[in-house]
Image (spheres, rainbow, N blue to C red):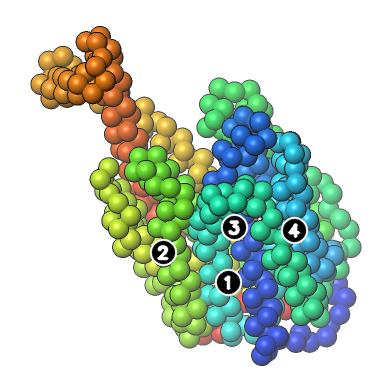
Amino acid sequence: MSRAATPSIPESTGEHVYETGARRTIITLTVIVAAMLELIDTTIVNVAINHISGNLGASIEDVSWVVTSYAIANVIVIPLSGFLGNLLGRRTYFIGSILLFTTASLLCGLSENIWTLVFFRFLQGIGGGALLPTSQAILYETFRPEERGAATGIFSMGLVLGPTIGPLLGGYLVDYFSWEWCFFVNIPIGLLAAWSAFTFIREPQVRHRVRKIDWAGIGLLAAGIGSLQFILERGESKDWFDTHSITWFTIVAVVSLLAFVWWELRTEHPAVDLSVLSRSKNLAIAAVLTFIVGYGLYGSLFVFPVFVQRLLGFTAVLTGLVLFPSAMLTGIISLPLGISLQKGVSPKLLMSFGMFTFMIFCWELGQATMQSGAADFFWVLLLRGLSLGFIFIPVTMLAVTGLHGRDIGQATGLNNMVRQLGGSFGIAITNTYVAKRFAAHRAELVSSISPFDPAAVERLEAIRQSAGARAALSPVEADQLAHRALDATVMAQSYHLAYMDAFMLIAALFLCCLPLLFFIREEKGGGKNAAGAH
């Protein structure tokens, strides 16, 4: 049966009132803070993994579930945010999600064993997953359609600042307080955001009533997306398909997602309205581009800290400080770029520049050496900040261009889910690629070392003599130490080459996706014809 036979009926047909003045400013700050809470918590815990492991007496593999459970909850809830906003009321759902996130943060910090922490972290992910798409939808309902470019520019600051601030803030809290403060820090901010949302945000005048809950669609989505996220998070550590659990979760993911798409396109009241993709070709293209951007953003943000901390000796705080200027640059240019889109600047032109600049950033990082220092990365990382601004704002506006009413909520949910999955694919594929390239480079370097290689013989002899002179070792002990030192050098060089390969892979991916920009349909009038929310 075609679902068009029973259209969704608005509860109210009153004209929507757009906010102005101080009220609009407060609402804007509220939704950006809420979105940043969610994004910061995707990365803030990463730097505390070792401390949590030692404090709770858990293995690193068990503690990694603190990260995995949050990501799985996020990716399940994000595409359902439009449906849940219609079911509960967008304002009610937004406030409830902030309070759930804040309460779960408190319980995470009070947890006394690892599995209690994992459970409350999952609840935190359910609350946090709603904040990003719902914040975006509320922001679009607050600004007039002709001002939506500026709104997108403002919102995009949080998209980039959040993941970058997370490791810096987490490193500071762990170094100077304790790992629990990675969760406690959310409490005052969350309570303030909830109060502000309750006081200033209004329920939309036009609300589409949910006449029937699509339990089958929700179940298939949870099984499919949850299984896929588990595979991406744990695949590398479990040797992918050499492990039965990964194989079975892959089967569940494929079957559930295919059944989900089939069901949602046939049912009258879908939890996730996939037909919006057919009504907006630009949304479909934006989804692909958003996936690529998520892959590049999180993939590069995964490799860079590991490279500088493992090989160059950077601390977590220093790594965050090195990354921070690039995020600030993105924030600074976001609003002007959004306004330029409103005035009719071509999104194709901006995205082309942004993707090309991101390729240069990845290429330059791919030329880094073992002697590189913090100052050497300053200008290269500024390229990253510049490029992300030129990509994020146009692609975020592109996703909602030409859409109205409840389609806005569906589009923001789908687009944010795709970015989250792009990031998960980026981390998983990059991690696996680094492991494969490390093995290949190590084999190549080891094969070039032989007793007949003068350079290798000279290096070993120098280490033997140095060790013998410093520690008064026997010839046998000095020889063993020399071989261990040479092996450590080979390992470091192999990892260095593998990380450089990973940056070049991301650059190649962006190059391959540039032709997609030719399929974007630009509406006359630029940003003035951007999607209305009602």
**N-term-proximal mark, 2 vs 4:** 4
Label 1: state its secondary structure.
helix
Of the numbered discs in the image, which one, if any, rests on residue 214? none
- For the N terminus, the image quarter is bottom right
Find the distance from the CA under tag 1 to the CA under tag 4: 21 Å
Reading the chain from its start, which is encountered first: label 1 or label 4?
4
Decide if residue 177 is in sight here: yes
Amino acid on which the number 2 mark rests in the picture:
Ser
| Quadrant in the picture for residue 355 | bottom left
| Residue farthest to the bottom, as pictured | 21
Expressed as whole percent of the image width and height from the top left, the position of residue 295 reads: 49, 51
Q: Which residue is mark 1?
A: 155
Nearest-to-viewer mark from 1 and 4: 4
Which residue is disc 4 drawn over?
Answer: 102
Residue at the spot of label 3: 40
Residue 517 appears left or right of 202: left
User: Mark 2 or 1, which is nearer the eye?
Assistant: 2
Q: Name which residue lies at 36% across and 60% down.
A: 381
Tell me the distance, in whole angstroms, between the alpha carbons under discs 1 and 3: 14 Å
* 442, 393: nearer the viewer: 442
Secondary structure found at label 3:
helix
Mark 4 falls on what kind of element?
helix
Whole-percent x and y of residue 376? Answer: 28, 56
Using the numbered discs, state the Cα–Cα distance from disc 2 to disc 3 in whole angstroms.
16 Å
